[in-house]
Amino acid sequence: MQISAAELFAARLPLVHEFETSSHRKAYLEHILVRVTDAGGAVGWGEIASPSGPYYCAETVQSCWHVAEHHLLPAVVGAGWSHPGEVPALWSKVRGNEFAKAGVDMACWDLWSTATGVPLAGALGGTRDRVVAGVSLGIEPTPADLVAQVARQVEAGYPRVKLKIAPGWDVEPVRAVRAAFPDLDLHVDANGAYTEDPDHLAALRGLDGFGLTMVEQPFAPRDLLAHARLRRVLRTPVCLDESVTDLHDLRTALALEAVAILNIKVSRMGGLTAAVAAHDLARDHDVPVWCGGMHEFGVGRAANVALSSLPGFTLPSDVSASDKYYARDVVRPPITADHGLVDVPWKQAGSGHSVDEEFVREISSRTARVSAG
Ligand code: OSB
Ligand code: MG
């Protein structure tokens, strides 16, 4: 396989409901869509779902654009490869920049599975027909607002809800949600906002009695030792997100016993190739995994669904329907959920969703093209 040209689109979609995390608040998202073509005219799409600012990780939309245009695509365009698993080796000299890598890696998987006529889920080693979807809810003005948001999602059929927490927004809102929904599969995600200060540890201990499925990324990404220590004092399983950006991180976390559950994000791991490898390693260590999201548009969302069909993804994934976030998605059909279940498209080659290219061009403020020669 040989990619003859690649295009980048900085595409913007408004969010149907503003989303607030421990670090910031947003009303629309701008993601970079990657379109690759081979000499035969086959097309593959990927999504660089970086947040705009460097708060979740060090990358930004601008840094991803730069790295994709000047470092990743020049390494890939014109190069020969026979399986997408070989693609990351083409940019092995580029350190970090996982979100940028993920979008290009994803486009190559989509191209290859489309061109060879296999469903993306099958190409990745998936086995499930349907994926259980969970939703992620941001910080709301009051606990009552949050309970109302949870009620909406439970009514929509989602069986698992994750709540963003931050110091000052933890025990009280979780108590309110738990009181309203005693049996709901509920977990919390702190995006690294806590430290081992006594106040913070008291709040984390205060969450331990609510029967949460996990507490996700309480401490800073590099602080694996604090996560290992917390595991020894909490009953609630500790899940890692930001801490694990590659297989080395995961091996270290496993050796330190800092991880009970792993959130695998295609973006954070640098692509589908790495995400599958992380799944395999976690599975070898009996660590359950689930697929996290970055509020992906349909391109990245479809890749998340395909990935979630692998056998180690035994916990609900953040693969809610497109319409939870966007009134109109960039793919046709959009991703839909029925009673919290998303069908894995096994009948079509590739991701099973085609990109509405006219719409993508309409919502893009910037494009770039890299071609061979
Ligand atoms: O930590 O999981 C996270 C969104 C932006 C940054 C970090 C996170 C998230 C989510 C998104 O929770 C969930 C989704 O895409 O459905
Ligand atoms: Mg998270």
Image (tube, rainbow, N blue to C red):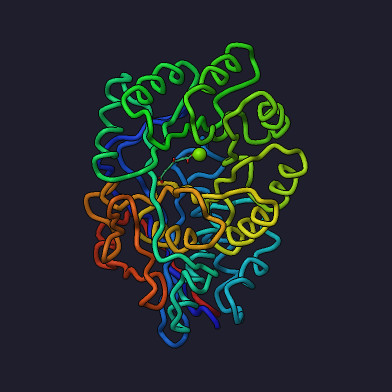
Report the residue at 27% width, 24% height from top.
Answer: 145
In the displayed image of the protein, which residue is found farthest to the top? 199
- Residue 171 is situated, as x and y percent measured from the top left of the image, at 45, 18
Direction from residue 365 to residue 316 in the image, left or right: right
The C terminus - image quarter: bottom right
Closer to the camera in the image, 255 or 329:
255
Image height of 99 relative to 107, above or below: above
Closer to the camera in the image, 6 or 251:
251
In the displayed image of the protein, which residue is found farthest to the right? 255
The N terminus - image quarter: bottom right
- Residue 179 is situated, as x and y percent measured from the top left of the image, at 35, 22
Direction from residue 293 to residue 342 in the image, left or right: left
In the displayed image of the protein, which residue is found farthest to the left? 327
- Residue 314 is situated, as x and y percent measured from the top left of the image, at 51, 52
Closer to the camera in the image, 7 or 144:
144
Closer to the camera in the image, 74 or 22:
22
Report the residue at 39% width, 65% height from top.
Answer: 344
- Residue 289 is situated, as x and y percent measured from the top left of the image, at 56, 50
Report the residue at 54% width, 44% height from top.
Answer: 59
In the displayed image of the protein, which residue is found farthest to the front? 183
Residue 74 falls in which quadrant of the image? bottom right
Report the residue at 41% width, 81% height from top.
Answer: 42
Image height of 25 relative to 179, above or below: below
